[in-house]
Amino acid sequence: MKKYKTLDGYHVYRIKKEKKFFYLADRLDYRKEINQLLATLDDLKFDSLIFLFGIDTGEYLHDMKKLICDKNRVIIFEPNPAIYRKFGPKIAENISIFPFEENQVKQIFDNTIHFKNINNIYFHAFGNYSSVYKEEYDRLIEHLDWNIINAASQVELAKRFKKIFIRNMTANMKVLNQCTPIHHYRGTNLNVPALVVSGGPSLDSNIKDMLIHKEALDQYFIITGSRTVEALTKNGILPDMIVSVDPVDANFDMMKNCLNLEVPLAFYEYSNRYLVGNYKGDKIFISLLFSHTVEGFEHYQGVFCGGSVAHACIDIANMMGCSPIVFLGQDLAHTYNKHHADSAVFDYDKSLPYGATAIVKDVYGNPVGTTLTLDHYRRRLEHYIAIYKDQKRIRFINCSHGAEIKGAPFKELSEVFKEEAAGSPKTNCIPNQDIHIDSRNTIDSLLTFIEEYRIKASQGLELCEIISSENQTKSLLKVDETDIDLQRILYILKIVNDFENAANTKYFGGYFSEFVFEMKEKTFDMSAMDYERLTSDLQHQAKSFKIYFEEMKEMLEEIKETILETVTEFYGSHIV
């Protein structure tokens, strides 16, 4: 590696890679490279998250710093170890540089990209980095796209199911004391092979193989989602656990003929309330929410959420110690031009658009149609499998004929039955109902919290209206600490901060996610260049927070009404 002066007075590195020399940016017109970076960042918001690929000699840092404000965060990935050592790890308080290491890149994206900032992320590959380090660049883009899509899907899910989530959570709280926490089954089926049954088009042929080798099924721990329970039981195959995570009433309809099974049903807070409430068998509780909100629930365990019930089933099998974990009906594609197996189609499916919108490679290397949603599930599953790639205890086998799943080699189910040696005898899920929760008291506390912050929102709204009516034009950076308007703004900020960081707001699920997202997008939309001026502008702050408190009150009223309606239906009376 050697530094050269460019024709326009900057400096650029030339490196040797695979016996060839490359300049990391244009040696003739380096200013052009800087200008391209600045153009990418031209409309930065005050809290934009900026990812850069490559720093070269760092000549662009001076100009870039003029565009960003204190709330911006810049993360630079540098694939050249020697260059990284010259700068890393911290360039400025809000500018960091990391060596390009794929697992670290994935972790950084996981930790920084979320529903609040998906519309506020900037990326630029500097100079010639995208071609000189093409392999690293392609991997970076793949992980960046995946994280943004994942975060965006969470926002969409929150908007779509926000009311159902509140209803299910409130109703399901009633049955918790009759449930066994999922963590009681950790390691109970060590080295027992597991069959995870999904409803993809391959399921019908998988069931035929299961029936041919029915005597071998006693050696396998069978976990299925609610869609495929009837397909199994109609063929005389009884699963060892049913997992239901979908919130919609269709899940109840899928299992309405199987409510008396002597098979434990695993569910979480947002699972469909009618299915959970009417199922007669033992119940297993998976905690994704209450472990963060209910005192004494801190040790309760959740499961991996990848958008599909199959992800939860696979994680439960793994938690119990099962291996290998065998995927059935996990096509994640429209194998045979079908969206589901014939045995796993319901009236509910007639209302859904199932057309293929993308092409992927199937287990034989041939193209097969899929959807963006199914492909997202596949990527999430591959991400999960990759976490365990270095652990010898756990293996994954794909017996579905659909999309190729990296980390889960394809094998016909009949071959699995012939070749996979039986492990330890499987252990049934013995109930251990040690959950203790006063559901009425918990709901009452939540309603008290809602009322408390409905009042505080009114107080904040009143302060905003006072400031606006007095029409005082002030810079909050230039007033005395005792200034009445500064004190008003500080109290407003305290209300907002306490509300957004309270544990109880986690109960609001999609309501809160959508609220925060909309506030950032519409009400608090400031450019980085205007950040200092607008945040110190008294009237601008009052106007923005007035909208915030109006929307906050409306949201709290709707949540309260939804909870009370559900309490009346499932508990028989209002909780005060």
Image: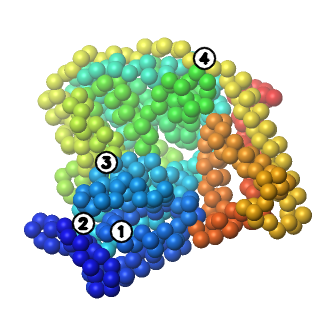
Cβ atoms under marks 4 and 1 closer than 8 Å: no
Q: Which residue is mark 1?
A: 58
In the rendered image, the quadrant that contains the C terminus is top right
Amino acid, disc 4: His
Q: Position of residue 461 (x, y in %)?
A: 82, 53
**At 77% across and 33% down in the image, what residue appears?**
448
Marks 3/1: CA–CA distance: 25 Å
Mark nearer the viewer, 2 or 1: 1
Between discs 4 and 3, the one toward the N terminus: 3
Marks 4/3: CA–CA distance: 40 Å
Q: Residues within 10 Å of mark 2 (few under 14, many from 20)?
A: few
Amino acid, disc 3: Asn
Marks 2/4: CA–CA distance: 55 Å
Q: Which residue is mark 4?
A: 436
User: Residue 134: which disc?
Assistant: 2
User: Residue 378: which disc?
Assistant: none
Q: Residues within 10 Å of mark 1 (few under 14, many from 20)?
A: some
* Label 2 element class: helix
Amino acid, disc 2: Lys
Q: Quadrant of residue 123?
A: bottom left
Colour scheme of this structure image? rainbow
Between discs 3 and 1, the one toward the N terminus: 1
Mark nearer the viewer, 4 or 3: 3
* Label 4 element class: loop
